[in-house]
Image (cartoon, helix red, strand yellow):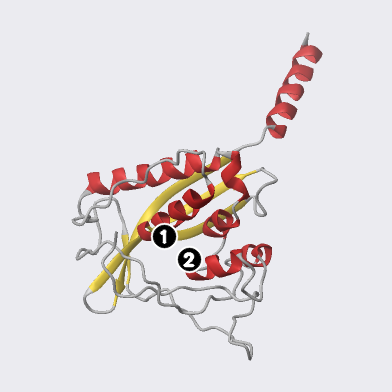
Amino acid sequence: MGEVFVSLMDTILDNFSNTEFIRVCVRDPRLHKDGRWHTHVDYEICLHTNSLCFRKKTSSVRRRYSEFVWLRHCLEQNAFIIDLPKLPPWNPFFSLKNTEQVIQRIKGLQKFLEIVLHTPLLLSDSRLHLFLQSDLSITKIARCAVGKTRYTVAEAIQCSRTGCIRSEEKVSCDSDCESTSSSGLGLSVDTSGRGSPIFFQSDGDPEPFCSFSETTSPLTEY
């Protein structure tokens, strides 16, 4: 009887390990200061998967709300017959001091990604993979996806968070204006900026083996 039970458990575990899964979590909103007067909020996106569609099985990147808006627009261009999920609505009065607003924003962003990641047709879009598993700005993502960078999509993903840094780049997208430093959720403020030193080749494109950093322009966020 014991041997039958062990054999059954082994079979269950084997089937479980062979089951494809994609898990995504949006968390840790942070307030960043863009100069003296403007701020924006970004969120950590953690991905864990065993799917062969993804180059990395675990990854973590930070994205802001306006970048989610950009991603949805990109996916919408290719998803002619798919009804894409909605993003949480833009709130001109969004504040990290408002716990309910923060929770609803995070839930909405995560729900959006969960639906997208479980729509097989959308997984063929390289911009989605770069959004989730690289530190490239949306401008660099758009260029990389059409082969206009010195590095490939795979290289951009592979060298993400490995010690090389993306070139500072002004991005014309909006950001939530904030005046608060933290909320009751233990949310943090980053005043150091996200830009970092980079190394350029003669043609002006950063090396694919750099850690791609990003700066944002002083904006008003979606």
Q: Quadrant of the C terminus?
A: bottom left
Name which residue type carries label 2. Ile
Q: Tag 2, which secondary structure?
A: helix
Q: Tag 1, which secondary structure?
A: helix
Pointer 2 and pointer 1: residues touching (CB < 8 Å)? Answer: yes
Q: Nearer the viewer, residue 181 or 211?
A: 211
- Indicate which disc residue 84 carries: none
Location of residue 214 with respect to 73 vertically, above or below: below
Name which residue type carries label 1. Glu
Left or right side of 120 for 184: left
- The outermost residue toward the top is 1
Location of residue 123 with respect to 42 vertically, above or below: above
Q: Nearer the viewer, residue 57 or 219?
A: 219
Q: Quadrant of the N terminus?
A: top right
Which residue is denoted by mark 1 in the rendering? 67
Tell me which residue sits at (29%, 72%) in the image.
33
Which residue is denoted by mark 2 in the rendering? 138
Tell me which residue sits at (66%, 76%) in the image.
150
CA distance separating discs 2 and 1: 7 Å
Location of residue 181 with respect to 208 vertically, above or below: above
Give how far across and how far down residue 140 sits, in percent: 53, 70
Q: How many numbered callouts?
A: 2
> What crowding class fits label 2: few (fewer than 14 Cα within 10 Å), some (14-19), or many (20 or more)?
many
